[in-house]
Amino acid sequence: DNLPSILYLVDACQSIGHIQVDVQSMFCHALAATGRKYLRGPRGTGFLYVNMNVVNCINPIAVDHFAAPVTFEMITTNGKEDVVIDVNPRKGAKRFEYWESNISTRLGLGAAITYCLDEIG
């Protein structure tokens, strides 16, 4: 994998919704922000941006069956059956998502982002 030796992560919790933020002009590999604070979204929401050049090189520390589907395969070796379990993180940003989520707060975060883009630009 072509992962840089040092990743540049921006904590934008104090910036998003207050000032314009452009990940391309910052040349950051990743940016994380909360939905509340200046974005004024619902508590418990937030988002993560990960540059496409590094997203598939980073494995999340915790996954569920949505972020990393599990496959099972029965194999037989010397007459003995065994189960091979394989966990493969999805490609792209879906590797950081979970199956369960609160749809109403996600919609609220979307509305807050839309309002912010309309007001701040």
Image (tube, rainbow, N blue to C red):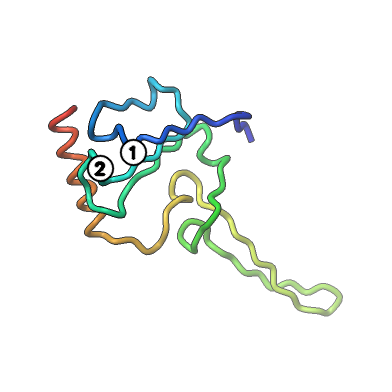
Q: Quadrant of the N terminus?
A: top right
Q: Residues within 10 Å of mark 1 (few under 14, many from 20)?
A: some
Residue 52, position as x, y percentages in the image: 47, 34
Q: Are marks 2 and 1 in contact (CB under 8 Å)?
A: yes
Residue, x 18% and y 27% (percent of image)? 121
- Looking at the picture, tell me which residue is in the foreground, 106 or 84: 106
The label shown at residue 27 is none
Residue 3, position as x, y percentages in the image: 60, 33
Q: Say what amino acid the circle numbered 2 marks.
A: Lys
Residue 90, position as x, y percentages in the image: 51, 51
Q: Write down the quadrant of residue 6 in the picture.
A: top right
75 horizontally vs 41: left or right: right
Q: Secondary structure at mark 2?
A: helix
43 horizontally vs 1: left or right: left
Q: Which residue is mark 2?
A: 37
Q: Is residue 62 above or below residue 115?
A: below
Residue, x 58% and y 55% (percent of image)? 88
Q: Say what amino acid the circle numbered 1 marks.
A: Cys
Q: Residue furthest top?
A: 25
Residue, x 21% and y 53% (percent of image)? 107
The label shown at residue 13 is 1
